[in-house]
Amino acid sequence: MERLLTVSGLSTEFRTERGVVKAVNNVSYHIDGGEILGIVGESGCGKSVSQLSLMQLVPSPPGRVVAGTAEFGGVDLLKYPRKSREMCSIRGREISMIFQEPMTSLNPAISIGSQMSEVLITHLDIGKSEALERSADMLSQVGIPDATKRLKDYPHQFSGGMRQRVMVAMAMLCTPKLIIADEATTALDATIQAQLLELLYKMVSEYKVALAMVTHNLGVVARYAQRINVMYAGRVVETGTVKEIWANPLHPYTEGLISCVPKLGEKLEAIRGMPPSLIDRPPTCPFLARCKYRQDPCYSEPVADLTYIDKGHATACNIKLKEAGLL
Amino acid sequence: MVNYIIRRLIYSVFLVFLVSIVVFVLMRMLPGDPVMDMVEQQIAEMVQAGHAPDLEMQQFLRNQLMTYHGLDRPVSVQFAHWLGDVIRLDFGRSMVRGFDIVDEVGRRMVVSIYLAIISMVVTLIFGILFGTIAAVRNGKLIDNVITSISNFGMTVPGFMIAILLIWVFGFLLDLLPIFGFQLPWMGDPGRSVRQTILPVLTMSLGGIAGLARMTRSAMLDVLNADYVRTAWAKGMREKAVIFKHVLKNGLMPIVSGVGGMIRGLFGGSVIVESIFVVPGVGQLLVMSMLSLDYPVIQAVTLLMAFITVISNLITDILYGWVDPRIQYS
Amino acid sequence: MATEMTNNPKRAVNAPPGEEAFEVLFEEPLPPVNEFKRFMKVFLHRKVVVVGLVFVIIILVAGLFSYQIAPHDPFQINLLNNLQPPSSEFLLGTDDLGRCLLSRIIHGARLALITGVSTVFISSAIGSVLGLVAGFAGKVVEDLIMRLTDAWLSLPPLIIMMFVGVILGRGVVGIVFAVALGMFPGYIRLVYGQVMTVKQNDYIMASLAMGDSKMRIIFRHILPNCITPLIVTMTMSLGGAVMAEAGLSFIGLGLAPPSPAWGTMTNDGYMHLAHLPLLSLAPSAALVLLVFGFNMVGDGIRDALDPKMRGTME
C-alpha cells in the first residue's frame, strides 16, 4: 500500500503556570493506506496530543505545535492555519476523528440527524434530504435499529455505547482515508467495548480506511493492528509490527506493557513507579527511573532517537542500540 | 407540557397573592398619614369660605375620610375587601388624585412596556453580539476592548448614564430632548422617536455591558466543550461552528437570565422615568409612594409582580425549548 | 507520601515475594505550590484587577482619614461663595450652598464604604441563616421560607428598597437595612442550594448514620462548603450595594441632606448640570470608581478561589 501519512519531528508544547510541558517531543511515524496502526502508552504520554496536533485541534492557548511536518496527500497538514479552508476540507473528509468522551462529544442541543448530515452537507455537494438518507443508512450499518426514526433523537436519548456508534458512523460518512480513534472505547463497559472494536474493525476493513488506534491497552491493539507505536513521555520509544513487538520487545517499557496484559494462568506484573514530569526534562532516558535494566551510562548519556534495528522495527533504548552496534 | 404550564400558572397566581400580602403589610408601615393632606386641603377651602374649623372639626373630617376610604377597618378586612375587588378587576380610584386606577395604570403601562421592550431588544442584540465577538476573538485586541468597556459599563449606575447623556446630547450638543415622552401613535412620531433615544440608552447600556460579559463567559465555556471540538473535527468552517454549535448552547444560561433582566428593567424604569419625566408606571409609583396613595401603590406593585412572574414562566418554557434535555415534570 | 518522596529519593518498592527487588527511582516532585502565593498570583494577574484594587485603597484611605484629608469642613455653608467653578482654594468648586465639593466627596467615601460593607454583611447574614434554616428545618418551614423568597424576588429590588427605606427613615441605618432587604433573597438561594448539594453527599449520610447532630453537620460540613461561594458573592455584591444606595439617594429616598452621600449630591447638582456639570458628575464619578474597584476585586477573588482556574495560568 502507498504511504498515506508521514509525520516527522512533531513537537507540541503546553505553556502552563509551572513551565513549558513538552507533551509531544520529536515524534516521527507513518501510516500506510488501509493499515491499522496502534498507538499505545500510559495516560499523559502524548499519544492523544500527537493526534490532535495533526488535526490542528490542540486547544490553543495553552497548546502549540512548535516543530515538525505531517505529510498527507502531498501537503503538510501543519502548514495550514487551523481554521483555514484547506484544513477544514481535510478534517471530516479525508481524516476523521472519534473521541474518548461519548457523553460530551455530541452536541446535546442538536438532533443526531442534524449533527450527522452536516458532515455530508459541509463536504459533499448534496442536499439536506439526501444527506439525512445517507446518515440513516450509515446509522443502520453501525447497528442502530430504527435508524431513520432515531435521526430525530437527541444525544441524551442514547446510551454511551450507542453514542460511540453514532460517532463511528459520523466518522465514516465521507469515507475518509484515515480515521483517528482516540481512546474511542476506553470509557465503555468491557462487553460494549469489545462490540464497538469489532464494529470499528469491520467498518475500516470494509471501506479500506486506515485507522490510527490510540489506546493504553496493548491487548486491544495486538488484536486488530498491524503495527504499533509505543509512546512514553512524549516520545515514540519503539515501533514495529505486532508480531515483532510481541515476540521481541526492544524497549523495557514495551516489555512492561506486555506483562501488563492479563494472560490466563499467569501472574500480572505492573510497571512500577509513575511517568515522569514533562517540564524541564534532562536529556537522559525518560524511562530511566523505572527501568529494570538501566546501566550506569544511562544516567549521563542523552537518550537516543528512535533508530531502526531491523527493517520496520525501531527502538529508542540506548542499551539495546549499543548491543546492536548502532550507538 | 400543558400540565406543567398550568401548574406553573397556579403557582404564579399564588406568588402574586403572596406579594400583595407583603406589599399590603409594608404599605401600612409607611410613616405618615395619607388622609391628612386631604383634610388640610378641605380646611383651607373652609377657611377661604369664611368658616373657622376647630380641632374637633378637623378630627371629624379625618374620621369621615378614613371611613370613606375604608381605612378605619382592621388591615385584614381591608385586604379581604381589596382582594375581592381585584378579582373583579376593580382596582378602585386614586385616594389622592381621584383618577380611575385601571385607566391610568393601563395608559402608563403601555408607555413603560413600550420603552422596556425597545430597551430589551437593543440590550439583547448588542449584548449577545459583543459578547460573542469577544469570546470568539478571546485574548485579541477586540476582546480586550469589549471586556474593558463592559467591565466599566457595568459599574456606571443608571442615573449617572442618564446625567451624562443629558449633559452631552441635551446641553453640549443640543441634539435630543431631555425630558418628556409621548407614544409615537399619540402625536408627532418624529419627536417621539427622539424622545425615546435617551431613556432607552439609559436603560440598555448597563444591560448590554452585563449581557456581553455573561455571553462571553458562557460562549468561552462552550467553545472549549468537547462537542465543539467534534464540530471542528468534522471539518466545519468557523461560521458554521459558531452559529450552529456554539451560539445555541451558549445562549442557554443567557435565556435563564432574561427573566432577571425584565425584573431589572422595571426596577430601572423607576429611576429613568423620574429623570426623563416619562409618564410611565415607574414615575407613578414614586409619586404615589411620596403621597401614600395606597390603592395606586398596591395596583402598580401587583402588576409588576405579575409581569415578573409571567416572564419567569416564559423564560423557563423558552429554556426547555433551547435545551432538549429539560423535561417538564 | 509527598514528603516521604522528597526525603527518600531512592526508595525500594516492596517486590512481591519470589521476585527480585529492584529500586524504582522517584524524581524530585515539583515543589508544592504555596496556596497563598498562588492566590495572590492569580488575584494580581489581571492588570484591571490591580487597577480596581488601587481605586478601592484610595477610597478606603479617603474614607478612613476624611477629617485629615479634606481641605474644608464639608458642612460649612457659605452662601456668598456658592456655585463657584474649581479654584485653587476649592479644587472642585462649591455647591449651591457654598460647601467645598471635594471635601464633601471625601467625606462621602466613608458613608459609601460604611453603607456598602454593612449592607453586604447584614444581607448575607440574614440570607445565610434563613438558607440554613430552610435547608435543615422541616418541610413546612422550608416551604414557607422558599416560597416567600420567590415572592420577594417577584418584585424589582429597587421597589422593596424604596418601601423599606421610607419605612425606616432616611438615616444610614434605614438605608442599610433597605438595601440589605432588597438583596438578601440571593443569599438564601445560594446557601439553600449549597445545603441541598452537600446533603446529597455520602459523607453526610455517614455522619447522620453515626448519630452526629444537625448542628455538628452544619458546622463541620455545610458551612465550610458555603464559605467560598459566600465570599465570592459578597465581594461581587459590594459594588451592587453601593450602587443601590446611591440610586435610592438619587431619587430622593436615600440618605437625607445635608449628609454628603454621593447619590444625593449627584441629584442636588443635577439642577446645575447646564452650567456647572462637575457638581453632578464628580460625585457620581467617585461612585463609579468605587463600584468598579469593588467589582474588579470581586472578579479577582472569584478567579483566585475558583478551583477550575488552578494550574491553567501561563
Image: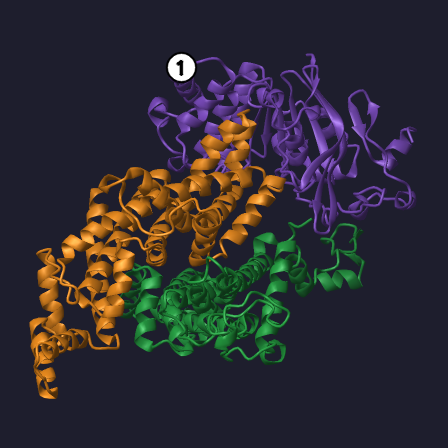
Chain colours: A purple, B orange, C green
Q: Is residue C111 above or below residue B327?
A: below
Residue A284, by quadrant, is top right
Residue at the spot x=13%, y=73% of the render? B76
Residue A50, by quadrant, is top right
Is residue A187 visible to the viewer in this orientation of the structure?
no
Q: Which residue is denoted by mark 1 in the rendering?
A: A130
Residue B53 image offset from top left, x and y in percent: 9, 84
Camera-side residue: C63 or C220?
C63
Residue A49 image offset from top left, x and y in percent: 66, 35
Q: Is residue C103 above or below residue A150?
A: below
Camera-side residue: B116 or A64?
B116
Q: Left of B262 or right of it: where is B134?
A: right
Residue at the spot x=58%, y=29% of the render? A181
Q: Left of C94 or right of it: where is B294?
A: left
Q: Is residue B283 above or below residue C216?
A: above
- Disc 1, SS: helix
Residue at the spot x=58%, y=69% of the render? C59
Q: Quadrant of the N terminus of chain C?
A: bottom right
Residue C124, by quadrant, is bottom left
Camera-side residue: C196 or B209?
B209
- The number of numbered badges drawn on the structure is 1
The amino acid marked with disc number 1 is Glu
Q: Left of C269 or right of it: where is A11?
A: right
